[in-house]
Image: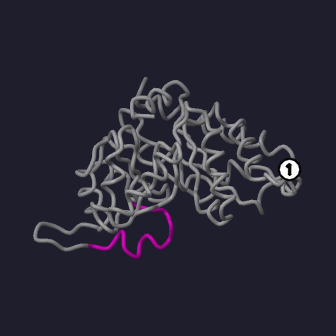
Amino acid sequence: MNRLQLIAAIKEKQSYLCVGLDTDITKIPQYLQTNPNAVLAFNKAIIDATKNYCVAYKINTAFYEAMGVKGWHIIEETCNYIPTTHFKIADAKRGDIGNTSAQYAKTFFETFAFDAVTVAPYMGEDSVRPFLEYQNKFTIVLGLTSNAGSNDFQKLIIHSTKKEKKLYQIILEKIANWGNANNLMFVVGATQANDLQDIRSIIPNNFLLIPGVGAQGGSLAEVSKYGLNKDCGLLINASRNIIYASNNNNFSEAALQVANNYTIEMQEHLKTIWY
């Protein structure tokens, strides 16, 4: 799925919701846990319940890699089950020397049918470049994250001859020149909403993947106010508060309702840019 197709999907559904499939077998309904294909069955039920209300799904590979070979099969089957009308993100946070990154890119863009993969930029351009070389694929670079430890490095003040800048600002400015809005997105945590105006001044056109709304306390209203651009430019990821909305037999119905509630609010925010 390319940028224009993603924007068209957002306009059609009036939603910029991404459902995070961070599936932990210990948290799914107990009656499913005895199923030998419990995680896949759970994922399929969540997808069926939410697909009319979201435009993207994000598979956090860590929850599956911990299961060994079986987990990789579930990644593949879940990815293939997601409709082709939806944007598919591998939340893998890869990043290594060039020839290794080339293999990571091949994994998620060729072996698996993902549209995007999250990447850590710490090792520099040659670690990101192999992902950017794929046509109609997105590299989603960690920009400013929502975890408490983000302050350890990302907001360090860097002194230069011109002016002081935070490290994440320098990273965004530099990486923005490695690609463009058609192949490059950034992760910005919802709990960093106060920095979104500054971030938008650096990267006005790129899509931002925003985790942290809901369970982590981020505000959809604030993120939308400061992060929306003329093309929407946001994918709001919600994981736990959708997929674990209920731990009973009605978990899929509960997930549907929460996803619908997000969409209703998103429709109002989209009116500020498209109506």
Give the residue displayed 40% in from the left and 59% down from the top: 142
Compared to residue 77, the image places residue 8 above or below, namely above
Give the residue displayed 54% in from the left and 33% down from the top: 15
Image quarter (top left, top right, bottom left or bottom right) of the N terminus: top left
Q: Quadrant of residue 162?
A: bottom left
Image quarter (top left, top right, bottom left or bottom right) of the C terminus: top left
Instruction: Say which amino acid is labelled 1.
Output: Asn
Residue 145 lies in the magenta-colored region: yes
Compared to residue 264, the image places residue 225 above or below, namely below
- The magenta stretch is 144-157
Judging depth in this view, the residue of 258 and 53 nearest the camera is 53
The spot of residue 187 in percent (x, y) is: 43, 54
The spot of residue 168 in percent (x, y) is: 32, 64
Residue that sits furthest to the bottom in the current view: 152
The spot of residue 258 in percent (x, y) is: 69, 42
**238 lies left or right of 10:** right
Give the residue displayed 72% in from the left and 38% down from the top: 257
Q: How is the image coloured?
A: one colour
